[in-house]
Amino acid sequence: MRWLTLAALRSGPTAQQSIKAEQSERIFRRAKCASYDEGMELAFRTTAPETFNEVLDIARLLRSAGGRAHLVGGCVRDALIGRPTNDFDLEVFGLDPGALRRVLEQRYQLDLVGMAFGVLKLRGHPIDVALPRRESKRGLGHRGFEIASVPDLTEHEAAARRDFTINAIAFDPLEERWIDPFNGISDLEQGLLRHTTEHFTEDPLRVLRGAQLVARFSLDVDARTVAVCRSMEMEGLAVDRIDGEWRKLLLQGQRPGLGLEFLRSAQWLRYFPEIEALIGCEQDPEWHPEGDVFQHTMEVLDAFADQRTDDRWENLVVGFGCLCHDLGKPSTTVFVDGRWRSPCHEPEGAGPTRDLLARISRETRLVDAVIPLVEHHLKPRQLFDAKVSDAAVRRLARKVRIDRLVRVAQADWDGRPPKPRGADPACEWLLERASCLELEAKAPQPLMQGRHLLEEGLAPGPYFGRVLAGCFERQLDGEFDSVETGREVLRGLIQAHLRSEAN
């Protein structure tokens, strides 16, 4: 019996079902293809032809020295489902570490940073070459392993150390042979995430990896894998490793909400209590027919994934903004006059957002960029409904980047099924006004500076700050938009200051 996914909650033919159907057809064509030239070689050549030619050359070079090279891991998985393959991993049998290094150094410059783990990186090429290895658990976390390279390991033993069956598929590019001891191809075709062996429990990072794989490939999860994940502890995982898995979930996930649902099912949201608190937090069904705040957050993340851009940093900021936008609701939600309400949940979300991001990332600028999105995510609707002037838009742009805010607010608007998705008029209005003011991606800057006061013959003093602050407020109100027109306003403020000093 498989774990129940979110598919039943989607309207019509689900995105997850469509993705699986397309992946299944691609896998059938490639993995079952009678002609090798029309199968995996075509898949690799289509996405990375030059690199694949290099892979074949390396495999031939290693074979001439008595080794066997297999393509392994994500590059095989991604090629099977027709996704671009940018990085290649080769696992080499039959050569000890010294022999492998000597053979490769005949032709390539090597980066030896991973040599202790049996991994050699080819400088200038997106190719890693590794030896099969045994890993013995000796301590806590993903680093608590004793690793030994074992060139004569069997193919089955080498695959058994991998986390999930879909990552344990190998391909011999010279012999045109699949190595699939754990039926990963079948699992890919079915859209199923399943762990390989009982050694899965030795690395807690694999639970978070499972979440991002579920999100990226819209997978169901085998019930036994969910049960195993429930038995695992985080064991003090390093924040930078946690960060990496969350980034993949947000930046590459086709359905990030599925990743959150997996973490809930695996009972791993206990390590992210700010998200766990969203479960069961009620919302007004008129505005949120989709369910509680956790369900809404999953839907918002899925809506965000459908509008990602090519800018990874902007996607990361907006993605975390979507994840965190309603973290203030659990502490503010009350039932008043027959309706659920969450007054002031936007500013109240700043604290939980800071706490959650501290568990996930050490990047201070990320926290600084996300919190304003949480604090102001309702502003597009509020300003639109109030029919405010450009002065309010300018003041909002001082606090938060409006283009990011609009993306979060649009995902928030779309994340309320069965209400239909579509352009939020409030977001369109705000982005149009900000664009006209040239403030969609920047804050307004004071036109009048201290040097302009000096040019008026004034001596520097504490009052400079007060006068300039007043002048900036007039600028935000739209009283002037250039230094020339600003001088008259500045002079008026100077005269007012001098009169107050005289009195």
Image: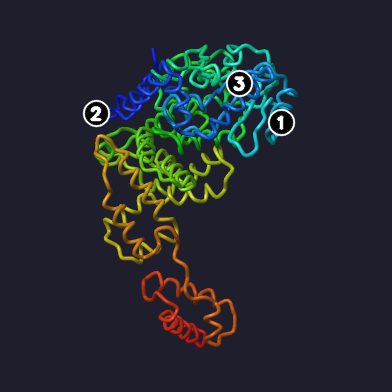
Q: Is residue 423 left or right of residue 155?
A: left
- Three-letter amino acid code at the position of disc 1: Gln
Q: Earlier in the sequence, mark 1 or mark 3?
A: 3
- Three-letter amino acid code at the position of disc 3: Ala
Residue located beneath label 3 in the image? 69
Could you say whether the residue bearing mark 3 is in a helix, strand or loop?
strand
- Disc number at residue 12? 2
Residue located beneath label 1 in the image? 106
As rendered, which of 263 and 352 lies closer to the eye? Answer: 263
Foreground tag (1 vs 2):
1
Residue 318: x and y, percent?
A: 43, 46
Would you call the spot at circle 2 few (<14 residues within 10 Å), some (14-19), or many (20 or more)? few
Q: Is residue 63 left or right of residue 476?
A: right
Would you call the spot at circle 1 few (<14 residues within 10 Å), some (14-19), or many (20 or more)? few
Foreground tag (1 vs 3):
1
- Three-letter amino acid code at the position of disc 2: Gly
Q: Quadrant of the N terminus?
A: top left
The quadrant holding residue 335 is top left
